[in-house]
Image (tube, grey):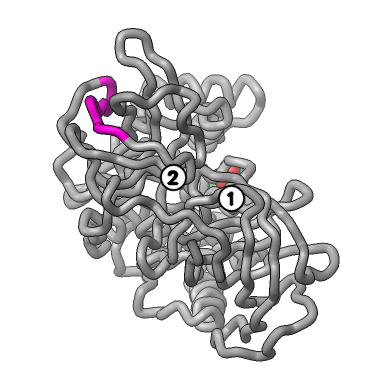
Amino acid sequence: MSDKPHQNLAVIGHVDHGKSTMVGRLLFETGSVPEHVIEQYREEAEEKGKGGFEFAYVMDNLAEERERGVTIDIAHQEFDTDNYYFTIVDCPGHRDFVKNMITGASQADNAVLVVAADDGVAPQTQEHVFLARTLGIGELIVAVNKMDLVDYDEDKYRGVVDDVKKLLQQVRFSTDDASFIPTSAFEGDNVSEKSDNTPWYDGPTLLEALNNLPEPSEPTDAPLRLPIQDVYTISGIGTVPVGRVETGILETGANVSFQPSDVSGEVKTVEMHHEEVPEARPGDNVGFNVRGIGKDDIRRGDVCGPAEDPPKVAETFQAQIVVMQHPSVITAGYTPVFHAHTAQVACTIESIDKKLDPASGEVAEENPDFIQAGDAAVVTVRPQKPLSIEPSSEIPELGSFAVRDMGQTIAAGKVLSVQE
Ligand code: GDP
């Protein structure tokens, strides 16, 4: 583990624009993937007639690990710069990337947006920028990638930069909080070393830009919130819930409560990376043991918090949502599945209270009959089973959710208020 401040980084952008390749190269050039592993991928790639794919292979392999439920050991997706220790909060190759961006095991502090120079702004560029803004991502580093495919042409680069700036303005993302870098993930231009191919560019490399990001504030002032990912029984220890500390501090000896299961007890031990630790902080993946709590007392989707300030359980909640895709219209009574932190609960949209102008956020219509793809709205939601969720203004980490139906993410949103 590193003493450097921690940054959770999302890598976003349209499919095939080079996210996996970029992440693979970042891991490689920072020495986070051993050369022999890269060599092995290179050989495999060449055997399959896909020379040069080795960086993407690294990420694909990691994505596969995640699919198999390997969530605790995230060592492979970490790298460091002089100032920070970075964790890539999601694997771009993951099929539920968008859902994970929203409900992700951890919220990203900042993001790298990859836009291919030969393709420019594409539908998922737009979608991801929109989500980044809804979810409160701090700064965006825009890698205008595949510069090798456009002969490192400055005008081409400027064109893409202008289009991305327009997009950022559309969603009211301050362009002051974005930096732009011409890159080739494939050739390694301006990733960790300044490229001779772009003499017209005198800004930072991608690694320098990452190193210069502002320090994220560590949410230890907020009360403990630890969504439970799994519950194991380990011989010699007993029941071990595991999850990631989102806010606050988990300490041995503390009295904690699990909601909505509504049980509490004293923390006996906390383990991280197979070692016992006295406390765990935001971003830490832990397993812990609580006196008197059995395997069937708690479940995935519970949130652990201090017994004196337990996580809220919503009878109903009001939320602001953005409908990303839906084949028809959404009306009151619609009951899709809400994914919030580690919970998945069917929830009924009881009423559509306001339709909002997606760009300005101002009220466009009170009590509309329906909403559809592209609309933003304020809705009142009733979970069909107890759900622990928090207003995003109080605990942002537990205040956002994805709405899923028919195997798709149809909307994303954040919680405005909770009625317990
Ligand atoms: P993702 O879907 O955004 O993760 O994209 P990938 O990283 O899988 O890349 C898609 C394709 O673009 C692969 O064939 C990569 O080898 C290729 N690619 C990625 N970055 C570059 C680049 O900078 N230059 C060129 N020429 N190809 C690239």
Asked whether 263 or 125 is in front, the reply is 263
**Three-letter code for the amino acid on which mark 1 is drawn:** His
Image location of residue 255, percent across then percent down: 24, 39
Using the image, determine if residue 11 lies above or below residue 57.
Answer: below
Residue drawn at (59%, 24%) of the image: 46
Image location of residue 323, percent across then percent down: 68, 68
Residue drawn at (34%, 37%) of the image: 264
Q: Mark 1 points at which residue?
A: 339
Quarter of the image containing the N terminus?
A: top left
Residue drawn at (58%, 41%) of the image: 93
Q: Name the residue under label 2.
A: 259
Q: What element carries label 2?
A: strand
Snapshot quadrant of residue 396:
bottom left
The magenta segment: 265-274
Q: Distance between the residues labelled 2 and 1?
A: 16 Å
Nearest to N terminus: mark 2 or mark 1: 2
Q: Is residue 337 shown to the viewer in this render?
A: yes
Q: What element carries label 1?
A: strand
Q: In the shown orientation, is residue 284 left or right of residue 37?
A: left
Asked whether 346 or 184 is in front, the reply is 346
Q: In the shown orientation, is residue 416 left or right of residue 118?
A: left
**Three-letter code for the amino acid on which mark 2 is drawn:** Gln
Asked whether 222 or 256 is in front, the reply is 256
Using the image, determine if residue 319 lies above or below residue 35.
Answer: below
